[in-house]
Image (cartoon, grey):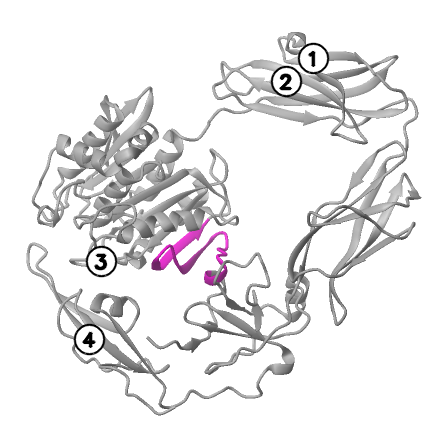
Amino acid sequence: MKKSLFILSVVLLICTGVVNAGTWQRESAGGFSEVYIYSPESVSPIGSGRSLLIALHGCAQTNEDMKGAIWEAASEAYGMVVALPEAMHKEGFGCWGYWSFPKNRNSKDYRNIRNLVDKLTSRPGLNIDKDQVYIAGLSSGGAFTMNVGCMMPDIFAGMGIDAGPSAGTDSSCAISRFCGSVNSTVRACQELAGSYRSFFDTQITSTAYGTSDSTVNQHYAPQNAGAMAKIYGAQEDGSVETIPEGTITTWSEDGSAAVSMVKLNNVGHAWPGGEGASGGYVDGSGFNYGTYLARFFMENNQRVNRNQAPDVRIISIRQNGSEIEVKGKATDPDPGDGISSLKIKFLDSCDKENVVIPEEDIVSSLNSDGSFSHNVAWPVNDRAYVAVIMATDLQTPPGSTTVESDPVSVGTPSAPLSIAILQQEAVVEDDCTGILLSGEAKQGAQPFEGVYVQVDSENFKRTNGTTSWQYKTCGLNYGKHTVIAKVIDDDGCIAYTEKVDINIPAPYQQKSGNTINFISHYAMYPNDNYPDAPSNSWGLCDKSYVELNSEYGVSEHFTIYGTEDGTVWCLNAGNIPTSQPETPADECEDWTSTNTTHENEGRAWSSWSFAFPFGFTYNYYAAGSNEPLGGGSDTTTLLQEKTGTGYYQRGKCPVTDN
């Protein structure tokens, strides 16, 4: 296919991997061309960060339909990121191909789901706890969920299977017909897991079905629940919880729910989306399975360390004659837990790498209410000390908390040092590519001379100045550099600044070639000059010049161009064209792909007819011209388009003279 140029004007958040909290975003990620993502303001009540639920649509349903379920309340209440991908490798009636081979972690949508998890968990802004990653789905999405959960139990701590056929069944068993058994489902699931079977020890599962479902046999839900309970070694509790919408049966292991089955009265073949939910195959009558799953996963997750660390407070620290006296309190919030050790050490407040009084365990000094008092002789006069106390509980693995006291002075120590960077900027001049820093350093209220600056991993270098200091260095490469400054007094006391990252932008260069699009916006992430930019990503930014200048060090506005392969380049203000370049009238592109790929990428559309069971016939047409393509989903066809018109026809582009 010929390469064409394009400008993307409305997907900055998509390209940069930024998802705004409390909103839905639509993007391509992990190999999926379309994923809806909702990121809450809150974090999970357990673990570290947010949880992640990937929810899969069913046959004859889209991720847009699934978005019509009420996800937002559960997401906010439980700190759960929700991701709704549209299947890429659809089969049958727009289904996830759970029956198709190969079934492994690197094939088709199995690979895409794994990549989607990697993509989302690697985004710092989402702050996803990898011990709280879950998957759920309806119908074929439910069956695919079971395959994924069985195949990747190391990645998914839990799964929710709604009206999904069992692992190991094929498409002939999808509609009404019931196939398999608990034992055959166990075998199929364990075979999918392979060498990852040990992770079943900490995985949990929920199944669900409606009593009015006449599409997928209702016996699959108890079969799936029974199979996963057998794999987990869980036992049915013997009691069934009655809820207004139906019942919930639970299988437990070591007192914790490992499997649940939700039976919903008068619900058909649909995802229970909560009262007011809408969308194809989404039930809006009341029960919200997404909310139930968020709570079930949060309450029963077996991978998150639920042990609460001890509470430690230093109430006072003071010089008491020839000793330093420390008083405090250490307790553990977990019922039945306690403090196994209470270790204390003293550091030189000037140089906290210097342990001046070695660590000792003073747990024997704890009173029944958790209070303690400890005295130790100070070794050197005219010094300031800090106490560091670490309390550890009785759990396995243990929880611990470390606190540090304020400095306590013994004798007459030197006044404390302080240092700050007040100004920082990149330098791009004819004879210098580097950075310029300035700031102030003090000892007590007095100016202090002798500031040292470190750039990246180089040695510290001394600066000039007393009341204020300044440092300039040249010969640096374009990109991000990390800077830190420090001062040292005669007693060896040290004070550091915070680390500061300074970006040196590369000169903007015009790329030769046929530029066929032009937009005069401010651009973000020019080329690879900003290391924080995601690889091969680019986008347009509608921020003001001032915002860009302060955030990204852009000294001039510029426009950005991109190509289909993600390559970018920029034009500075002096090179911006005065008018929009025109597309050559005879420029043409052509693609050779399957009909399904043409449709997924917007070059074709399809219509279908249905005959039981899974007797689907698809007819494919070129977008724009509506010319029939012939064949089926996997038939390879050649399409051409006059660049930028969106009008596709069969055949190869005509050869033109250059």
Coordinates of residue 182 in the picture (x, y in percent): 14, 31
Mark 1 vs mark 4, foreground winner is 4
Q: Is residue 295 above or below residue 583?
A: above
**Label 4 element class:** strand
Instruction: Please tell me how crowded label 3 is: few (under 14), some (14-19), or many (20+) other residues with Cα within 10 Å.
Output: some
- The alpha-carbon separation of the residues under discs 2 and 1 comes to 8 Å
Amino acid type assigned to the residue bearing label 1 in the image: Phe
Which label number is shown at residue 621? 4
Mark 2 vs mark 3, foreground winner is 3
Q: Earlier along the polypeptide chain: callout 2 or callout 1?
A: 2
- The alpha-carbon separation of the residues under discs 4 and 2 comes to 72 Å
Q: Are marks 2 and 1 in contact (CB under 8 Å)?
A: yes
Question: Within the magenta stretch, is there residue 31?
Answer: yes
Question: Within the magenta stretch, is there residue 417?
Answer: no
Q: Earlier along the polypeptide chain: callout 4 or callout 2?
A: 2
Residue bearing the label numbered 1: 372
Which label number is shown at residue 90? 3
Coordinates of residue 180 in the picture (x, y in percent): 10, 37
Q: Are marks 3 and 1 in contact (CB under 8 Å)?
A: no
Question: Magenta residues?
Answer: 14-39
Residue bearing the label numbered 2: 330
Left or right: 133 in relation to 244: right
**Label 2 element class:** strand
Q: Earlier along the polypeptide chain: callout 3 or callout 4?
A: 3
